Amino acid sequence: MINQKQPDATAVQPRTINWLAVLAAACVLGQMILLTAQPRLPGQPTSIRIMFLGLAALCIGSFALIYQVKVRQSLIFGRPLAAVAMVAGIMLFAVPNVKLYQWMKDRQFAHMQAIANACLAYASENHGVFPPSLAVLLKQKAFPVTDLSDPTNGRSPYVLPPDAKKLSAHKFDQLIRQNSDFRYVGAGVSNAVKTLPPAELSKVFILYKTAQLTGAGGPMAFADGSVRYIYGDQMAQTLKVCNAVRRRMNLPPLAFGGTATFGNSAATTQK
């Protein structure tokens, strides 16, 4: 009888290529090519194609990790490549968007700072009294109209209509109030020393986001010209302190998240 040679069960299996991992890596390579060929401008969101390739790298890489688990795979073109492709695909999509959000937050603060500086400049020329409205500052071209827009809202900057110069002062004021992403509450505030001690200026805010809520955090511009981010758990106390100073200035209190009543006098209120 001829003895047939039995396969050696202890023999080392050859390493195979995980083609799903290779495909996931190809998606990442496509992301890199798109990012290099189409550099983004500041404020420009990530391309849909880059986002799609990133999600594809994540999904395909996940399948590659469980594909042929019992098969001995290549150290380079196997499961390690799939894991790297998954991480790289998400990073190439997420990091630019994180930078975009930070850019929008920086522009948000810059817009509020420009308006606060314009208010201080107006007060220095008017015996310490802040402007009655933002429309007055725009008439004086104290800041560009695009600063009325909050970049974090994801909308294009506001542009005045062609007939804006023909509007009456009242209608122009209404136009600005309706289209501004920031709420101005500095009417009647004065930074004259005899009216308000300098140390109190940092407690009175004059500008905040239109959709600001009491329990939510947000940037605030104060009467001393500073712009600071107030966290949600501190917002109610910040509002309370501000209203305490406003009462000493014979100004009505303010409240977030309510129906606003505006006026051009020092008695501007928000209910």
Image: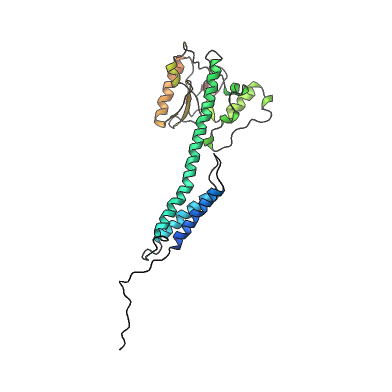
Rendered residue at 49%/34% (across/down)? 105
Q: From this view, report whether residue 254 is shown above or below residue 196.
A: below
Q: Quadrant of residue 181?
A: top right
Rendered residue at 67%/25% (across/down)? 165
Which quadrant of the figure contains the N terminus? bottom left
Rendered residue at 48%/48% (across/down)? 92
Q: From this view, report whether residue 144 is shown above or below residue 86.
A: above
Tell me, what colour scheme is on the image? rainbow
Whole-percent x, y for residue 147 in the image: 56, 29
Q: How many marks?
A: 0
Whole-percent x, y for residue 11 in the image: 32, 71
Whole-percent x, y for residue 138 in the image: 60, 24
Taking the image as shown, residue 239 lies to the left or right of residue 2, namely: right
Q: From this view, report whether residue 198 is shown above or below residue 257.
A: above
Whole-percent x, y for residue 31 in the image: 51, 51
What residue occupies the far top of the structure in this picture? 194
Q: Is residue 52 visible?
A: no
